[in-house]
Image: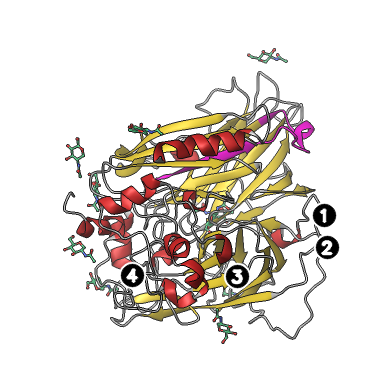
């Protein structure tokens, strides 16, 4: 029976349109050596290669990723960032929430509908693996792109901080009782397009849609093309009203911008004396990114260039100088479809973020005083098997659960008690950004009238400034288990994650593919019951309540399997 589920999904998706196709990727996840910044280190690649390939599909296509773990010494999993996974919540890829870790030599097949156009990315959502390289762009093309006449070519530009040590080493150093300042690893460099040269080939007189994706584990980046203006048409997976003439953008980890660059016919000089048009990416490592004082240290700069095909490549672009950073306020974009703020609001989920320490004095990050701890049973599998008791938050263990009823308009309020900016991401939705004040605004207050935003920008990752807050809104219409977390990977490892249990009435008996259950079985993880696998939802025996003192990252499942 379990052989047919891909066919079933594919067939039902095919109804979307006669052109719909299936795009399939057969991937072995493997260790490879790479040196994107000149320093050789082991990275996690695909089919023996790194950088990882691009997933590309058209709206209406079915994307199938047939993954086999050939790492030998670590488990894995893939999350498709920004994809809603409507009716396929078990394909969301968050290990511990939506699936079990995939152990060495196991195969796990992802299959989902490319339902919304945009610039997305995929990455491991299994303890600390994406800074080790397991990430790539995911582009969904739109046959009815409202901006199709604005550009001739489509290019992707990824930006990332980069580390010479492996994540597991870095996280072990971070999770020590003596790290009382909650310091996180600092990057060794900034890389563009995973270490390729950063040259973007353009032709005079043409227009380019540049999809800028931030793969960073920590640092936000500023990007500027100097005097060449950027026209922004999309934020994450949402078209916005074209915002022209932007000179600087700040991209926090996990965010994306689609920008149009119009290359003037004389912008690159003549054939004989062709110029390189530089662009600058500056990794922002100052604790509160709103402080752009000149005294700050900006150690990680990358200068790339736009150039004509025939420009000699030994020419080096002249680094751009920027006097001050004053990026465009991304809360000011307006959704192209002019959807008003959803309402009236019928539920609130208020989360206060602070750093904290666990019972062993190890630094952690907390929502309302509680750090996220992965439980034995993936949260979705509990929701699917507990019957009507799946509305009980305490059945899920210490995953900071919040149960939202179908049809509610839910306001998610994040109070950031840290003086630094943190990029918060919700799986399964493009939320509306209702309010995102500048740093120092303090906590949100329920009594104050909400601001009047006409066509709030929608996105899946929002930068929340230091000692300030953000108010996000969703309609509770996508049954599933979705994580809400800081996208600084190091903070995820400190436990800065919460879990939205959305429309639990529609999760009773949710059809988890047999292959996914088999993967759990192979490493001894139960697939039903509460967080510890008990039929009685109130039985907390065996719930994980204290973080392990030794961080094993994605190696952790090894203790569960005699096979490894
Ligand atoms: C996925 O790959 C594995 C290993 O290469 C293969 O045995 C299996 O048939 C593939 N599954 C699908 C659905 O293509
Ligand atoms: C797994 O193997 C790779 C490649 O040899 C190595 O770089 C990495 O450190 C190993 N991971 C662990 C957790 O031991
Ligand atoms: C913290 O302790 C670890 C070992 O317990 C040590 O290696 C490290 O240097 C210490 N760090 C600081 C900042 O003292
Ligand atoms: C990517 O995000 C990181 C983390 O917030 C940030 O430091 C970096 O500046 C961002 N890069 C770009 C190009 O915006
Ligand atoms: C510039 O060079 C390209 C390629 O070498 C050629 O196709 C084009 O005609 C040249 N343009 C001019 C204006 O000379
Ligand atoms: C900004 O940073 C500078 C240099 O570290 C510091 O002197 C200044 O007080 C900061 N300004 C604010 C408003 O935090
Ligand atoms: C990086 O670029 C900024 C802006 O032009 C400049 O202020 C800074 O000095 C540069 N840093 C380095 C290390 O070149
Ligand atoms: C978190 O704490 C705040 C402040 O006490 C409270 O208003 C809010 O309801 C709490 N949130 C949850 C999810 O318990
Ligand atoms: C972590 O790995 C070590 C071996 O490296 C093992 O002894 C220990 O039991 C593991 N701990 C957990 C919690 O998995
Ligand atoms: C995975 O399969 C390969 C080839 O069959 C085998 O050599 C290896 O020992 C297996 N690894 C694990 C961890 O089971
Ligand atoms: Cu964070």
Among numbered discs 3 and 1, the one appearing first in the sequence: 1
* Local SS, label 1: loop
Among numbered discs 2 and 1, the one appearing first in the sequence: 1
Checking the image for residue 338, the label placed there is 1
Q: Give the spatial CA distance, label 3 vs label 1.
A: 26 Å
Respond yes or no on whether mark 1 lies under 8 Å from ligand 4: no
Residue 149 within the magenta-colored segment of the rendering: yes
Decide if residue 457 is on the left or right side of residue 415: right
Magenta segment, which residues?
Answer: 133-153
Determine which quarter of the picture holds residue 56.
Answer: top right
- The residue depicted at 58 percent of the width and 56 percent of the height is 428
- The residue depicted at 33 percent of the width and 74 percent of the height is 543
Q: Between label 4 and label 2, give the one nearer the viewer.
A: 4
Mark 2 and mark 1 in contact? Answer it, CB < 8 Å: yes
User: Which residue is identified by label 3?
Assistant: 404
Residue 501 x %, y %: 53, 66
- The residue depicted at 49 percent of the width and 51 percent of the height is 92
Crowding around mark 2 (Cα neighbors within 10 Å: few <14, some 14 to 19, many 20+) is: few
């Amino acid at each position: 029976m379990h052989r047919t589920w891909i066919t079933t999904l594919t067939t039902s998706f095919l109804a979307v349109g006669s052109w719909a196709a299936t795009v399939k990727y057969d991937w072995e996840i493997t260790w490879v050596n790479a040196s994107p910044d000149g320093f050789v280190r082991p990275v996690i690649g695909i089919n023996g290669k790194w950088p990882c390939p691009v997933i590309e599909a058209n709206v209406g296509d079915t994307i199938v990723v047939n993954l086999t773990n050939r790492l030998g010494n670590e488990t894995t999993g893939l999350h498709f960032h920004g994809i809603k996974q409507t009716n396929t919540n078990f394909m969301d890829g968050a290990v511990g929430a939506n699936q079990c870790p995939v152990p060495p030599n196991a195969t796990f097949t992802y299959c989902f509908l490319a339902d919304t156009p945009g610039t997305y990315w995929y990455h491991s959502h299994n303890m600390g693996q994406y800074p080790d390289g397991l990430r790539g762009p995911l582009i969904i093309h739109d046959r009815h792109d409202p901006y199709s006449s604005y550009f001739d070519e489509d290019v992707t530009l990824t930006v990332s901080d980069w580390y010479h040590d492996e994540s597991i080493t870095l996280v072990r150093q971070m999770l020590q009782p003596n790290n009382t300042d909650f310091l996180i690893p600092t990057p060794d460099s900034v890389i563009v397009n995973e270490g390729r040269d950063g040259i973007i080939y353009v032709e005079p007189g043409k227009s380019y849609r540049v999809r800028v994706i931030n793969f960073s584990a920590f640092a936000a980046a500023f990007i500027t093309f100097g005097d060449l203006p950027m026209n922004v048409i999309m934020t994450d997976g949402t078209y916005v009203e074209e915002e022209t003439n932007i000179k600087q953008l700040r991209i926090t980890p996990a965010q994306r911008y689609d920008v149009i660059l119009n290359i003037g016919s004389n912008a690159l000089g003549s054939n004989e004396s062709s110029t390189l048009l530089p662009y600058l990416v500056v990794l922002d490592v100052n604790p509160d990114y709103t402080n752009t004082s000149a005294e700050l240290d900006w150690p990680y700069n990358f200068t790339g260039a736009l150039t004509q095909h025939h420009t000699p490549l030994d020419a080096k672009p002249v680094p751009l100088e920027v006097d001050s950073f004053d990026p465009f306020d991304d809360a000011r974009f307006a959704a192209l479809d002019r959807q008003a703020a959803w309402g009236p609001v019928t539920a609130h989920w208020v989360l206060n973020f602070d750093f904290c320490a666990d019972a062993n004095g190890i630094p952690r990050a907390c929502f309302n005083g509680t750090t996220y701890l992965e439980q034995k049973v993936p949260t979705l599998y509990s929701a699917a098997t507990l019957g009507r008791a799946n509305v009980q938050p305490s059945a899920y263990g210490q995953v900071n659960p919040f149960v939202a009823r179908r049809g509610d308009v839910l306001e998610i309020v994040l109070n950031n008690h840290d003086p630094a900016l943190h990029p918060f991401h919700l799986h399964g939705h493009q939320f509306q950004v209702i309010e995102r004040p500048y740093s120092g605004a303090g906590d949100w207050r329920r009594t104050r009238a909400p601001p009047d935003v006409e066509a709030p920008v929608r996105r899946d990752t929002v930068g929340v400034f230091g000692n300030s807050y953000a108010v996000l809104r969703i309609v509770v219409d996508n049954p599933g288990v979705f994580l809400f977390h800081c996208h600084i990977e190091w903070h995820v490892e400190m436990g800065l994650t919460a879990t939205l249990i959305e429309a639990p009435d529609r999760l009773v008996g949710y059809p988890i593919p047999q292959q996914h259950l088999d993967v759990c079985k192979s490493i001894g993880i139960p697939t039903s019951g509460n967080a510890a696998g008990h039929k009685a939802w109130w039985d907390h025996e065996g719930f994980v309540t204290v973080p392990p003192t030794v961080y094993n990252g994605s190696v952790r499942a090894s203790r569960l399997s005699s096979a490894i």
